[in-house]
Amino acid sequence: MLYQLIINGLFLSATYALLAMAFNLIWSTTKIFDMGFGALYAITAFVIYALTMQLGLPFWLAVAAAIPVSGLVGCICYYLVYLPLIRKGSSEFVLIASSLGILVLTQNIIQLAIGSEAKFIRGPLLFNYSWAAGNTVITGLQLLAILLSLACLSITVLFLPNFDT
Amino acid sequence: MLGILTIAAVTVGCGQGSTQTGREEQPKVNEIKIGTILPLTGFAAEHGKDEQQGVDFAIERINARAKETGIKLVAVHEDSAGLPKNAVSAMQKLVQVDKVPVVLIGFSSPTLAAAPVADATKTLLVNAGAVSPRLAGAAQYLFNSIVLQDYEIGILMDYAFKELGIKTIAVIGQNNDLGLGLKDAVVREFHDRLGGKVVATEMYEVGATDFRNQLSKIKQHNPDAIYLASAGKDTALIMKQARELKINSQFLGYHAIEMPPDLMQLAGTAANGAIYTTGHGEIKADFVSEFERRFGEKPVFTHASYYDATNFVFQAIQRVITKGQPVTGENLRQAMLEIREFEGVAGKVRFRENGTVEGPVAIKRVKDGPKGEFETIRTIEP
């Protein structure tokens, strides 16, 4: 029972840890409290949905394609919204408010493009396969999420130079 | 935003109508506005979409006969997002700005919140989707055209206990009027009346997508069955995650289990074999084929329920106009009680004095979720 709760917790926190690390990368370097960050998280998922379910691309290809797309969206947000405001010397509050605007805009764009109901992405069969040890069960998706998250966090830490801040 | 566009479209449409009657000798067509407050976005958006489709489909067909009946319906759709506070403000807007005499609504907590406003403004409020037992008699102007769960759960628990041999049950559900109302009904019927054991009740906050912790706790007790007091995609996700955790209990529920194919896909094969009740009998075959022709997919119970409710309201409107009375909420409510028995595509219902209905209840099973195949085990007449 305890082990099951630990596995459940690790799975849920895998995504949150990645989000926290990414948010920190933005915050510690640019001091922008980016509320539109959640929108980026959603856009990546919906791009994968559009590519796999609506266009029929294989899952891993869609994932590989979605990563640069979300990077591109982040760039667009920066060049269209943040950079002009920073050049004008806006305070942090203005940047936070504009990031809120990005969040609302993205939500509505996704609603217009795809709709507001929950959507289903058909992943590789490995995701649904589960391993059991006694009463504790872990699925392929959970295992992959935990391992990938740990890997990404380690690589980021390894490549981050040490700043004296 | 959509609300503003709809009002603008309605205003333009009204303008068009009045210029036409000047030109020819056209029979006078009464244009009646009805409001809807449905969860178009948010955690219940899957149901909201079906509900709106049912209403719009009914209005389409009613308006096609507008020349004979002399009545045209215009829907003003509002979004409750499944939240009570949005329902209250939507209700006030519909009554004060659009001046609608009747509002169709769905989902238990928003309906309970809007009910006092209906009483205060004497607007008829018709619920065709919310099933919490707490709705019975909640307001004088609240009419529930769908059988509420206290009656359905009694039937389902009887079937489970006596015929399926289920002696232990766990409940997992939303932490709101719907989930808690259903949980109370299950405890009352299964434990108090039949003598079975409710081994666990786990509630979750609406909007949650991961139920593994609640399910892990339920798994410890190893119940024969799990009752799903949930709605929308929660139901599909719960079934999927339960099977992933190697929980083999029988799934029991109500009509929220019967969802359109793209939502059943969320559950995949996990939903197959789930047994649930719907508040009406088998859906009429000609409605099914008409719906399939129009929308390209088979209707589920929610579509039929809102289609029926719109038609019942239309019948009340017809009666009020024939009597030469103004179309107000008060007169519509009186007309509904006078007509009393309505025949819809999902069966016949009979209104009680407190605005609830008695109707046939069907016990159904999911045969193949992703393909949208559901089979009826039995229909029980009132």
Image (spheres, coloured by chain):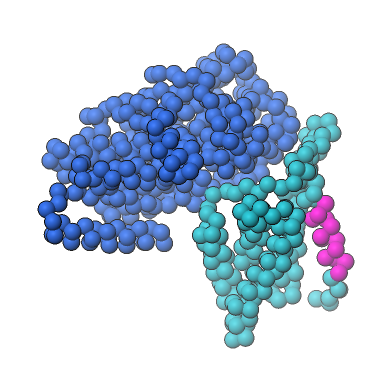
Residue B16 visible (yes or no)? yes
Identify which residue is drawn at 44% across, 18% down.
Answer: B380
Q: Is residue B52 left or right of residue B327?
A: right
Q: Colour of chain B?
A: blue
Asked whether residue B256 is drawn in magenta, I would say no
**Above/below status of B282 relative to B39:** above
Residue B130 visible (yes or no)? no
Q: Quadrant of the C terminus of chain B?
A: top left
Total residue callouts: 0
Q: Residue furthest top?
A: B162
Q: Is residue B162 left or right of residue B344?
A: right
Q: Main secondary structure of the magenta part?
A: helix
Residue A80 position in % (x across, y down): 60, 78
Asked whether residue A149 is drawn in magenta, I would say yes
Identify which residue is drawn at 75% across, 69% down.
Answer: A25
**Above/below status of B366 relative to A154:** above
Q: Is residue B254 left or right of residue A23?
A: left
Q: Quadrant of the N terminus of chain B?
A: bottom left
Q: Which chain is cyan?
A: A
- Between A38 and B139, the one nearer to me in the picture: A38
In magenta, the rendered stretch is A147-159
**Which of the 4 image quadrants contains residue B171?**
top right
**Which of the 4 image quadrants contains residue B290?**
top left
- Between B190 and B276, the one nearer to me in the picture: B276
**Above/below status of A102 relative to A135:** below
